[in-house]
Amino acid sequence: MTKADLIASVASDAGIKKSVAEKVLNSFMDNIEKALKSGDKITLTGFGTFQCTERASRTGRNPRTGQEIKIPSCNVPKFKPGNKLREALK
């Protein structure tokens, strides 16, 4: 499912225009991004939890040359599904 498909589905389910559904979805994604950037954890009960964790620096290899390279640490988003979502996927 693409973002356009999701917007169309939300608009249809809620009985609203696609432009309104797109604004809502964009706002939702922007607010999750802002919260993760500030170090907050977002919990949507039944659906899941978004949080940001730090990935440690490590040594890797350039696949073309085989030379060792240092991969710096970085922050990565993680999602842990809630019980209701897990049950729905069984």
Image (cartoon, grey):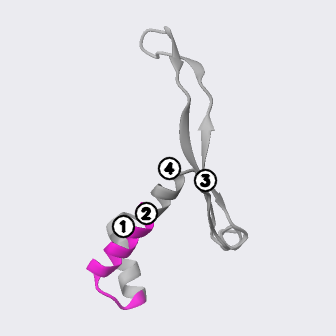
**Quadrant that contains the N terminus:** bottom left
Looking at the picture, how far across and down is residue 17, in whole percent? 28, 85
Q: Is residue 6 left or right of residue 37?
A: left
- Discs 1/4, front: 4
The answer to whether the residues at label 1 and label 4 have Cβ atoms under 8 Å apart is no
Q: CA distance from mark 4 to mark 3?
A: 10 Å
Q: Is residue 21 magenta?
A: yes
User: Label 2, on which residue?
Assistant: 29
Q: Tell me the element at label 1.
A: helix
User: Label 4, on which residue?
Assistant: 37
Q: Residue furthest front?
A: 38
Q: Is residue 16 magenta?
A: yes
Q: Tell me the element at label 2.
A: helix
The earlier-in-sequence mark between 1 and 4 is 1
Q: CA distance from mark 2 to mark 1?
A: 5 Å
Looking at the picture, how far across and down is residue 53, in whole percent? 62, 43
Crowd band around label 2 with a 10 angstrom C-alpha radius: few (<14), some (14–19), many (20+):
few
Q: CA distance from mark 4 to mark 2?
A: 12 Å
Foreground pick, 84 / 88: 84
Residue type indicated by callout 2: Met
User: Label 1, on which residue?
Assistant: 26
User: Label 3, on which residue?
Assistant: 51
Examine the rendered structure and indicate whether residue 34 appears above or below residue 53.
Answer: below
Examine the rendered structure and indicate whether residue 73 appears above or below residue 42.
Answer: above
The earlier-in-sequence mark between 4 and 2 is 2
Residue at 60%, 21% in the rendered image: 58
Residue at 39%, 69% in the rendered image: 27
Q: CA distance from mark 2 to mark 3?
A: 13 Å
Residue at 37%, 91% in the rendered image: 15
The range drawn in magenta is 14-30
